[in-house]
Amino acid sequence: MFGSLVVIYPTLHEGGELIFRHKNQEWKFDANSLIVSQPSPSIAYVAFYSDIEHEVLKVTRGCRVAVTYNLYLVDPRSKVGAPVHIPSFKGVSSLQATLRELLNRPEFLPDGGTLGFGLTYLYPVTFKTKLQEMTSYLKGTDAHVYQACLELHLQPSLKVIYDDNESHGGETGIMLDRIAKEPNYGDQEWSYEYTLVMEFGGVPVNKTESATLERSTWVAQWESEGEFITWVSPFNGQNRSEDTTVAYGNEPSMGYIYCRPCIIVRIAAAYDRVP
């Protein structure tokens, strides 16, 4: 499920407005005012993503009749003959032009590097989710970023970055190309970070632009080869998947493991870029 569609029927009523909130902004959808302003009986409808906070105000008079549809994603490959269509967004072209201009500048990442885009929207991520299949249902800005990078032949990919509680300041993480669920997280001898790096091939990375890889225990002490990410957009703090483990201190207790999906794009050195 990725969103909802609400259809309001033309019954006489007052109140019942829909309030939407997202990123400290608020919108009001007054279906009754829209319906009564029409010359003939009409319905009103509104659709919104699942991560939008919404509220229905009290109906003060009459009766409000509405039908809510849950919107689900369907893999186009599951239907014979269904065309796979990636819509063309206006935002894609402007973002693509900006990225192309940067790539044409030799002073931009002259030796190459990695760009990171934190996902703006929330997604139904579970431990069974295959990351690369998420590309078919990216929304809004996230879809713009992915599509623009594809059209520039930059080979974007979805990764997850796990919190690294063993490093200093919480500014570094461990990047994987899949969501891992390991039953031995609670092994008293090793931490879950050890499992991610040493067994799953996780790569130490910075989670913020100001962080340095030297703050990662895995780079500083275990001599792991980290990867510095130039973050174009930050993480969405709510967009994370949660797992549990056993934390050992004075006594065993329940601990939590968080990972966040993001779009990662690796940029070639300036002399290897194709204009």
Image (cartoon, rainbow, N blue to C red):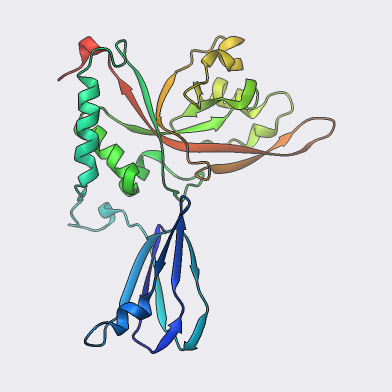
Q: Residue furthest right?
A: 250
Regarding residue 201, the answer to whether it shows in the image is: no
Horizontal side of residue 189 vs 152, given as left or right: right
Residue found 16% across the figure and 19% down from its top: 274
Q: Residue furthest left?
A: 275
Where's residue 117, x and y in %?
A: 39, 33
Where's residue 132, x and y in %?
A: 36, 39
What number of labels is visible?
0
Horizontal side of residue 177 vs 139, given as left or right: right
Front residue of 255/79: it is: 255
Is residue 39 shown above or below 228? below
Q: Quadrant of the N terminus?
A: bottom left
Residue found 35% across the figure and 83% down from its top: 9
Front residue of 182/1: it is: 1
Where's residue 39, x and y in %?
A: 21, 86
Where's residue 272, x and y in %?
A: 21, 12
Residue found 48% across the figure and 88% down from its top: 61
Is residue 22 shown above or below 5? above
Regarding residue 224, the answer to whether it shows in the image is: yes
Front residue of 273/201: it is: 273
Q: Dividing the picture into quarters, in which one does residue 177 lie?
A: top left
Horizontal side of residue 19 vs 221, given as left or right: left
Front residue of 155/133: it is: 155
Q: Quadrant of the C terminus?
A: top left
Residue found 47% across the figure and 29% down from its top: 176
Q: Dividing the picture into quarters, in which one does residue 241 lie?
A: top right
